Amino acid sequence: MKNNKNKIYEEIELYSKELKLSKLKTHFKEYIKEANSTETSYDTFLYEVLKKEYERLLESRLKSRIRMANFPQKKYLEDLKIEYMPQDARKKLKILSTLEFITSKQNVILSGNPGTGKTHLAIGLGIKACMEGYRVLFTTVPLLITQLKESRSNKTLRTFQNKFGKYDLVICDELGYISFDKEGAELLFTLLSLRAARKSTIITTNLSFDRWEEIFNDPVLSAAMIDRLTHRAYMVNMNGNSYRIKETEEFIKSLN
């Protein structure tokens, strides 16, 4: 009888492995022991086992979405210190955190001086989107332009554009820190235009719109880019005192 049970356990482990039921493979003996001790019915036992596997699958998918999004670090909306944020960001945080802008395919432009929490807010919205099942990509604008140029050189630009267009939300960080050449500006314009009114994009920038010509080096292209990105978009004024300096000051006070 004992040998028969061992055989059954070996088969359960094998089947669990082949079916990729990793939680069952690791814990099935515990499940069986608990079910026997509580005289759990067969249907309830099956339900509990499948529920645990389903929860594991959801957790695995979430971790995968966050990993594939390429966030430089994990920053959550709950970690934002509201009192440190610029006034306009405080007012619009509630509506942005509903992620309604993703379902309605609207953009979000976070514009303001450095250190005011633009990237933290963008990542926080991105991670929440991952948690709610959306496909998200985080990238910096300089990196994105480099990838676009490489794709064009390798004759894979269309593939790159198609993949880029499938994300529910793309976060383009640091627009304005580095100016582009004509090729880079045109490639970026085309790529972001493909998402217009189809998917959502978050842009963080340290430049006001009247200074975008400085990075695009083309007044016509700059105006067209602004027109495409801002149509029906949430505009968030992130000008204010440095969020990072306030956090540093608070940290220093905690040491005293």
Image: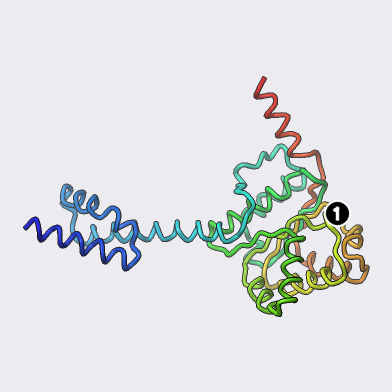
Q: Residues within 10 Å of mark 1 (few under 14, many from 20)?
A: many
| Residue found at the very far front of the displayed protein | 154
For image coordinates 76% across by 58% down, the residue present is 109
Q: Residue lying furthest top in this view?
A: 256
**Does 92 sit left or right of 226 as displayed?**
left
Picture layout, residue 145 above or below residue 161? above
The C terminus: image quadrant: top right
- Residue shown at 73% from the left, 42% from the top: 85
Towards the viewer: 24 or 146: 146
Locate residue 91, reporting x and y percent: 72, 47
Q: Secondary structure at mark 1?
A: loop
Quarter-of-image position of residue 24: bottom left
Compared to 192, does 84 lie above or below? above
Total residue callouts: 1
Residue 166 position within the rendered picture, expressed as x and y whole percent measured from the top left:
62, 72
Q: Is residue 6 left or right of residue 130?
A: left
Residue at (62% x, 47% y) in the render: 75
131 displayed left or right of 246: left
Q: Residue at x 73, y 71 (%)?
A: 150
Q: Position of residue 209 (x, y in %)?
A: 87, 59
Identify the coloring.
rainbow
Left or right of residue 96, residue 179 in this image? right
Quadrant where the N terminus lies? bottom left
In the depicted structure, whether residue 77 falls above or below residue 210:
above
Label 1 sits on residue: 207
Residue type, label 1? Leu
Q: Quadrant of residue 245?
A: top right
Residue 26: % across, % down = 30, 54
